[in-house]
């Protein structure tokens, strides 16, 4: 039986997939995005978070059976509200075998994987095949810029995206709009060109920049040093996607509907 490290189990989440969901945030991420808003998800190990109200340990080990038991106790309310479970992070693919084992133990619960796609083909395929829907982050297409702002090459990400399009798993492309980095007209056009002909694509979500991203760093003994001007106005440009006939939505502004693969029902996503 596999064990994994989780830094939060968030109940009644409404922005992490269809319906009302429980989101499991897994620790560990191979990327080092300079805009990361979950710094407690970077390290695979538990950490101490110190704030004025006191300190707490962020990160807890669960066996797959322990975590599945917690989630199955919520199954009736998740199904009753046309939702399910979302695995996020960090990067869930860093603990692919653990998450896959949890999925096998779930009782007819809709599963969403929220991922950067950075992993081996084997890890990605193992977990993707357990899911009903995938939220796939695409940040930067240019390999040099991707390496500069995230610390890793994007070749595995683009390779796994192509692999995903050959499966029967529907997916949503999510683009975090970081001022002067991911939100440029050139990068958005490159993303649109990359995804335009991929089978299984439901839509593209543009996620406006979160200026509260750096709030947790100090409490973890880390320093928030964005390699960009976070006060610059974000370029929310949907035209590169619209020109190619791609459904595109801006989180917090537009209203989207996506299908749930298990039953064919649909949910509004705001």
Image (cartoon, rainbow, N blue to C red):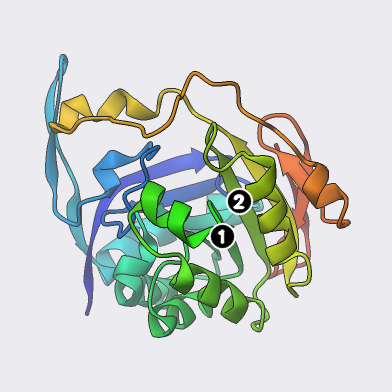
* Foreground residue among 261 and 242: 242
Quadrant housing the C terminus:
top right
User: Residue 195 at what x, y percent from top left?
Assistant: 71, 65
Numbered tag placed on residue 136 in the rendering = 1
User: Which residue was labeled with disc 2?
Assistant: 174
Q: Residue at x 46, y 52 (%)?
A: 145
Q: Could one spot residue 101 in this view of the protein? A: yes
Q: Residues within 10 Å of mark 1 (few under 14, many from 20)?
A: many
Q: Is residue 241 above or below residue 260?
A: above
Rendering coords of residue 199 (x, y %)? 75, 75
Query: For this view, does 57 lie left or right of residue 19?
Result: left
- Mark 2 crowdedness (10 Å alpha carbons): few <14, some 14-19, many ≥20: many
User: Please, is residue 73 above or below residue 19 in the view?
Assistant: below
Residue nearest the observer in this picture, 173 or 141: 141
Relative to residue 1, is residue 183 depicted above or below?
Answer: above
Determine the residue located farthest toward the top in the rendered image: 52
User: Residue at (73%, 29%) from the top-left corner?
Assistant: 253
Q: Is residue 81 visible?
A: no
Question: Badges 1 and 2: C-beta atoms under 8 Å apart?
Answer: yes
User: In the picture, residue 5 is in which quadrant?
Assistant: bottom left
Q: Quadrant of the N terminus?
A: bottom left
- Left or right placement of residue 53 versus residue 140 in this view: left
């Amino acid at each position: 039986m596999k064990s994994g490290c989780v830094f939060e189990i968030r109940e009644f989440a409404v922005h992490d997939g269809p319906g009302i969901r429980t989101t499991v945030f897994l620790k560990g991420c191979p990327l080092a995005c300079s805009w990361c808003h979950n710094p407690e998800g970077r390290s695979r190990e538990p950490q101490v978070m110190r704030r004025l109200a006191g300190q707490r340990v962020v990160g807890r080990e669960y066996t797959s059976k322990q975590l599945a038991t917690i989630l199955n106790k919520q199954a009736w309310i998740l199904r009753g509200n046309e939702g399910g479970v979302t695995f996020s992070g960090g990067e869930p693919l860093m603990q692919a075998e653990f998450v896959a084992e949890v999925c096998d133990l779930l009782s007819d619960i809709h599963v969403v994987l929220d991922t950067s796609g950075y992993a081996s083909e084997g890890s990605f395929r193992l977990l993707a095949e357990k899911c009903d829907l995938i939220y796939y982050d695409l940040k930067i297409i240019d390999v040099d810029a991707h390496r500069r702002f995230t610390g890793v090459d994007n070749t595995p990400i683009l390779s796994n995206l192509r692999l995903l399009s050959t499966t029967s798993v529907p997916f949503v492309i999510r683009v975090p709009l970081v001022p002067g980095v991911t939100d440029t007209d050139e990068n958005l056009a490159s993303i649109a060109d990359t995804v335009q002909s991929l089978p299984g694509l439901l839509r593209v979500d543009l996620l406006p920049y979160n200026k509260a991203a750096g709030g947790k760093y100090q409490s973890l003994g880390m320093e928030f040093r964005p390699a960009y001007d976070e006060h610059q106005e974000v370029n929310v440009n949907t035209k590169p996607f619209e020109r190619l006939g791609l459904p595109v939505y801006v989180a917090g502004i537009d209203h989207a509907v996506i299908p749930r693969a298990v039953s064919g029902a649909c949910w509004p996503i705001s």
